[in-house]
Amino acid sequence: FIVENGLGAKDVVENDKIHDSYRIDYFRSHFEQTLAAINEGVEVMGFTTWGCIDLISAGTSQMSKRYGFIYVDQDDEGHGTLKRLKKDSFWWYQKVIGNNGSDMS
């Protein structure tokens, strides 16, 4: 069971959009390798990501490094509107889990 896999990055908001192709590329490569392992006989029961929504780091109390598919408008000092924005990776991940990984484009 692959658990808490993910990529932390400083996402940039542009016109209420977050274009996080680096996160999509990261997950695509990990999913492809997981499928390759399955095809070679490895029993994989599941694959979970880190939090689906940006969260405060337990170790550093940071928000500037983000992990989720959904952006939360909050800075490291706790300021912000808390508005949520779905990142490009959200839409990509929704498609991938909807087709069980048969299309990861």
Image: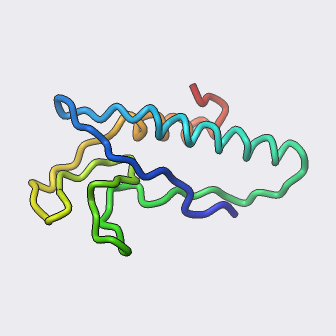
User: Residue at left 51%, top 53%?
Assistant: 6
Residue at 22% over, 49% down: 84
List x then y, in percent, for residue 34: 73, 47
- Looking at the image, which residue is at 55% across and 62% down? 4
The image quarter containing residue 67 is bottom left
Q: Is residue 81 above or below residue 28?
A: below
Image quadrant where residue 99 sits: top right
**Residue 58: quadrant of the picture:** bottom left
In the rendered image, residue 52, in percent from the top left (x then y), is placed at 41, 55
**Relative to residue 81, is residue 61 drawn left or right?**
right
Furthest residue to the top?
105
Between 62 and 95, the one lying in front of the other is: 62
Question: Could you say where residue 16 lies in the image, as x and y percent from the top left?
Answer: 19, 34
Left or right of 79? Residue 49 is: right
> What residue is shown at x 67% (from left), y 58% (from top)?
46
Instruction: Answer above or below: position of 54 versus 93.
Output: below
